Image (spheres, grey):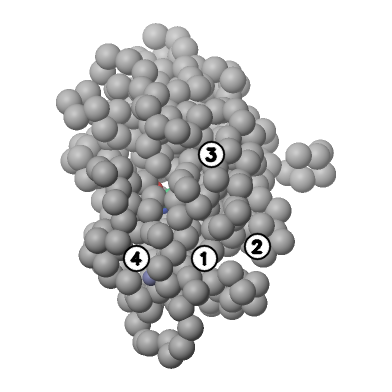
Amino acid sequence: MTDTVPYRGRFAPSPTGPLHFGSLIAAVGSYLQARANDGEWWVRIEDIDPPREVAGASDLILASLEMHGLAWDRLSYQHNRLDQYGAALDALQQTGRLYPCTCSRRDIAASVDSSGGPIIYPGTCRDKTGVVVENHALRIDTRNAMIQFEDRIQGRQSFPLSQESGDFILRRTDGLFSYQLAVAIDDVEQGMTEVVRGCDLIGSTARQMHIHNLLGLASPAYAHLPVAVDPDTGHKLSKQTFARPLDSSMALENIWDVLDFLGQNPPPDLRQANLASLWHWAIAHWQLDAVPTRSGIDVKSKQFYDGQTANPIGYKMKPDVSYEPD
Ligand code: GLU
Ligand code: ZN
């Protein structure tokens, strides 16, 4: 980053439920990194997957952010940007790296021996020629794509995409644009200089960078925060594991707990102070270097999780064909 490019970051929730402690970590981490760099912080509602959306969730998320003292510079909704995703898809078609896929999830599961591991699409339709049937998905070829980047928290990352994710979907059979496509395009077109989000998305970063590379776009910088791990299940705290919605009347305590989670060592007396003082302290003292370089942290015992998979930080990638983040 040079002095001439002001910092811009974002928080990009999907409206699939209210904000919970896990999502607040990504909100606070991205917000502090932006404010500490005198930058802008945008909120982008990722509402292009109606089947997964919950009515009223985006308003609940926004209200909860406000109650926690997180004020955005700009708010955008992905449903307003479908034309841009269509244009990007056309441009990607021109590269010759997209192809129609007519496999069902069951076909794919049956065609690979994953031995309990993640199912990686084997490229069945890659070289199919002939009539293109309707209702097909569009996949992107990942052969020979070795994605490398320097994560600002987790350090050097290398993802041989064809092994770790396989050819992934850009447009689904139901005609909806995929999360990967929309995010890759938005982060560049909205001028994000850095993306700060949870480690569960680090494999998605590699996929999004593959899209950038094929379109000749410069990727933003990336910083992946540890994710909150549920003490009972050992899995990421997420809407699927019924993480409790945040209680906004506890905003002060919630923000203090997130700062503590992120290794910022907030002074204990600020947990009894007021939200404005806590934010003031947090922005003035924010240190990205103090954030634990771990993929997950148990919210109760503070035990670290590193997982045991091949990628350097160990957070289990989810290359499954059905994968969409929550
Ligand atoms: N909308 C997705 C989520 O809520 C991804 C956000 C991102 O790319 O930061 O997990
Ligand atoms: Zn296929």
Q: Position of residue 279 (x, y in %)?
A: 49, 26
Cβ of mark 3 under 8 A from ligand 1:
no
- The reply to whether discs 4 and 3 touch (Cβ–Cβ < 8 Å) is no
Q: Return the x and y of residue 111 as percentages of the image width and height.
A: 30, 61
- Of callouts 2 and 3, which one flags the residue occurring earlier in the amino acid sequence? 3
Mark 4, secondary structure of its residue: loop
Answer whether labels 1 and 2 touch (C-beta < 8 Å): yes
Q: Which numbered tag is attached to residue 49?
A: 4
Disc sitting over residue 140 in the figure: 1
Check if mark 4's residue and mark 1's residue have beta carbons within 8 Å: no
Residue located beneath label 3 in the image: 196
Residue 115, picture quadrant: top left
Q: Which mark is residue 214?
A: 2
The extreme top residue here reads: 268
Q: Which numbered mark, 3 or 1, is in the foreground of this view?
A: 1
Q: Are marks 3 and 1 in contact (CB under 8 Å)?
A: no
Quick check: 120 left or right of 94?
Answer: left
